[in-house]
Amino acid sequence: MKIQRSEILPLGEYETIRDRFRGRIIELKKVRRVRINDDMSLLFENHDTMLLQVQEMLRTERITNEKGIAHEIETYNELVPGEGELSASLFIEIPDQARREEMLVRWCAIEEHVSFAIDGEQCRATFEEGRRDAGRAAAVQYLRFPLTARAKAAIAEKKPAALVFDHPHLQARVELSRALSQTLADDLEG
């Protein structure tokens, strides 16, 4: 379900619930985050994680006009998974600037080498074009995993699933936790 304008609280009202709302979403994100390696994680997004992003962006930027609010909703709705798909943010998290730059070059096109694997299916990620600059990856990538009917059924049955990376400079298979499998099944149920 996409974020609706009616869900967005005015800044003053948001401040009164912010700590509770953020706390709840931060707890949800703990289950939704998958550590790929020491330098990379992936967060499966949903309506609530993106609603927090909209509210926080409006708060940070002090956006109160309808055009600005509509723009933020539209931007973050692009990251809410659609029917029969999963969406995720892939984060390259390297504090050392020199090493980060080296790895962003090394992992160029990483977004083209990610799959969601379940029950013999490999659902290759699609990605937002234009996130690569001059032969280097962006530190944040937005991915979608269009699911086959078999993959959707396997998620509903909570079968074991994994993220698979087949990049020349990153070969990895990371199994999803049972809690995350349940969360993704709940997401697909709506």
Image (cartoon, rainbow, N blue to C red):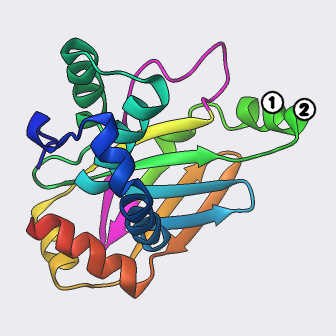
Q: Where's residue 175, x and y in %? A: 49, 77
| Residue at position x 80%, y 30% in the image | 101
Query: Over which residues does the magenta segment extend?
Result: 116-138
Judge by depth and name the residue closer to the eye, 103 or 179: 179
Judge by depth and name the residue closer to the eye, 66 or 160: 66
Q: Residue 98 got which mark?
A: 2
Quadrant in which the C terminus is drawn: bottom left
Which corner quadrant of the image does residue 65 belong to?
Answer: top left
Q: Where's residue 33, x and y in %? A: 49, 65
Magenta stretch: dominant secondary structure: loop
Judge by depth and name the residue closer to the eye, 178 or 147: 178
Distance (Cα) linking label 2 and label 1: 5 Å
Amino acid type for the residue under numbered disc 2: Ala
Q: Where's residue 87, x and y in %? A: 31, 50
| Residue at position x 27%, y 70% in the image | 184
Q: Residue 140 got which mark?
A: none
| Residue at position x 19%, y 78% in the image | 154
Number of labelled discs?
2
In the shown orientation, is residue 64 left or right of residue 91?
left
Q: Where's residue 27, x and y in %? A: 45, 71
In this picture, is 30 found above or below 22? Answer: below
What residue is pinned by disc 1?
101
Q: Tell me, yes or no, if residue 14 can be seen here.
A: yes
Which corner quadrant of the image does residue 8 belong to?
Answer: top left
Amino acid type for the residue under numbered disc 1: Glu
